[in-house]
Image (cartoon, rainbow, N blue to C red):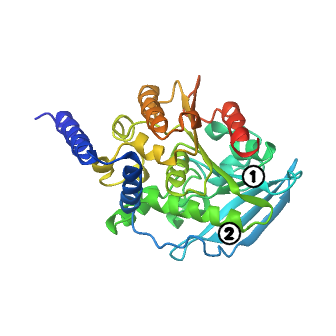
Amino acid sequence: MELKAYLRGLTERAAMERESRKGGIDASQRAIELREAFRRLLGNFQDRLGETTSPRLLEHVQCDGYVRERVEIDTLEGLRMALYVLIPDRLPSGAAPAVIACHGHGYGSREIVGLEPDGSDRAGDPGLHKDFAVALVKEGYVVAAPELIGFGDRRLEEDKAASPGRSSCTLLAAHLLMTGRTVAGLRVRETMRVVDYLQERPEIDPGKIGIMGISGGGLVAGFAAALDERIRCAVVSGYASLFEDSILDRNHCLDNYIPGVLMETELPELLALIAPRGLFIESGSEDRVFPRGPAVQAFKELQAKYDSAGAAHAVEVDYFEGGHEIHGAPAYEWLRKQLMD
């Protein structure tokens, strides 16, 4: 048997098995069961949601129109996470809305707040991330930009000695997988602790917290919103697709892989767990990492599931001309309607 045919057969059998298990289950019960199954697949992590994050201020810098803080918080299992918090100079009257900004592969949270890897101001091209955390704070949000584990300051020492863009994803994933956990699960659970932190801050409206992420940060944004109903809405850029035609279609970073997930579901059904809360998708015409064709099919499936949940209006897409990158303006306009209007 040709190897490609064998691999196709595995995914086809997985699809048939998961479809056969759905029979006779109504949509609301299916969502409950899927959410619980997905938590198990992501791995068994200590649940600290709602506990104090014990924040420590590391940096306070006045920027053009906003303050940039570097803060460190407790997450889980003895880990602490650094994040940037961008605060507009002019906060809206009353409690402010907030957005969690999740970077993709690169040199970490500094890449989305206008900084070089060493923390100095960046003067050059902002790359695929387009400093979207800065764009969000200039929209009037308090923005939390976490340093996802495996990037930036949260790398293994041997990787810190290499180039700034070298991640610790592979070894991190290997250790987690061998102990029944996943990188995706760890990043999602730590991001849910960022929600805890934002709800501790007195200037933030705890009912108006959104999330936005690009690429691997889109994975984190989508999955965190699917599991944490405190997140009011999500923007997923350069990620919403079909597992079979993206993650399994090329050699992706090991942090994308969740053992057994195709036995339970495909990516559109996972993102549909966000319903009836708002979901906005960005997809570039020239995206070679998460190609346009599967992204269109995934969005059609998302639309159908949102429609079944009575929330057809709550899911939108921006098919833009461009590559694997943040687009921005339509997503920012949509976020305003979700969190400010």
> Measured from the top left, where is residue 334 in percent x and y?
68, 36
Q: Amino acid at mark 1?
A: Pro
Residue 125 visible in the current orientation: no
As measured in the structure, the alpha-carbon distance from the residue carrying label 1 to the one carrying label 2 is: 21 Å
Please name whichever residue, 311 or 285, is drawn nearer the observer in this view of the structure.
311
Q: Residues within 10 Å of mark 1 (few under 14, many from 20)?
A: many
> Measured from the top left, where is residue 30 in percent x and y?
37, 50
Q: Circle 2 — which element? A: strand
> What residue is rendered at 65% in x and 50% in y?
210
Q: For the residues carrying marks 1 and 2, which lies nearer the camera in this image?
A: 1
> Measured from the top left, where is residue 107 in percent x and y?
60, 51
Instruction: Please tell me which of labels 1 and 2 falls first in the chain.
Output: 2
Numbered disc total: 2
Q: Amino acid at mark 2?
A: Glu
Q: Which dot marks residue 97?
A: 1
> What residue is rendered at 61% in x and 54% in y?
231
Q: Quadrant location of residue 144?
A: bottom right
Q: Which dot marks residue 72?
A: 2
Q: Circle 1 — which element? A: strand
Looking at the image, which residue sits at the far left? Answer: 1
